[in-house]
Amino acid sequence: MTLYYPPADDNVFNGKKLAQIVQKHLINTLKTNDWGIIPRPGLVVLRQTQMPAVIAELGYMTNKSELQLLVTDDFQEKAAQALHSAIMEALQQ
C-alpha cells in the first residue's frame, strides 16, 4: 500500500497522484498484493511537507512470508527499481 496526504486541490500534481504512480510501479514490479493507496491526513511526515510525499509500505516484518521476501537481495533490488521508475515518471508530470 502507499499512504498519502489528501490533497486540497486535485487539479495539480499532489501526494495522491504520486501515490498512484508509486503503487502502480510497485505492484507491476513486485507482483505483491495491491492494498491500494490510502489517505492518511494525520501523519505529520506527509502533512507537513512542502511537496508531494508518500510512504510506500513494501511489506510487514510481522508477517513471516513478507519478512522472508523483504530480506532478500532480489526483492530489495526490484523494490528500488520500482521506486526509481515511479520517481522518474512523477518527474515527467
Image (spheres, rainbow, N blue to C red):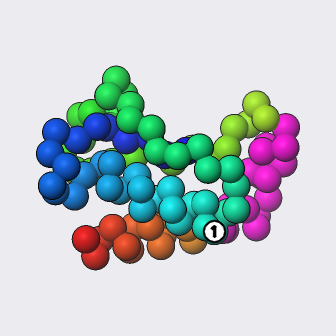
The answer to which image quadrant residue 29 occupies is bottom right
Residue 46 in view, yes or no = yes
Secondary-structure class at tag 1? helix
Percent x, y of residue 78:
66, 68
Residue 17 % position (x, y): 32, 55
* Badge 1 density bin: few <14, some 14–19, many ≥20, Cα 10 Å: some
Quadrant where the image shows the C terminus: bottom left
**Image spot of residue 7 (x, y percent):** 23, 41
Residue visible at 79% across and 35% down?
63
Q: Which residue is mark 1?
A: 29
**Of the pair 51 and 5, the residue shown nearer to us:** 5
What residue span does the magenta drawing correspond to? 64-79
Question: Can you say whether 84 is above or below 1 in the image?
Answer: below
Say which quarter of the image contains residue 47. top left
Q: Position of residue 41 (x, y in %)?
A: 32, 28
Residue type highlighted by circle 1: Thr
Q: Is residue 80 visible?
A: no
Pick whichever, 85 or 9, lies toward us: 9
Q: Which residue is drawn at the image coordinates 37% and 73% (left, top)?
A: 89
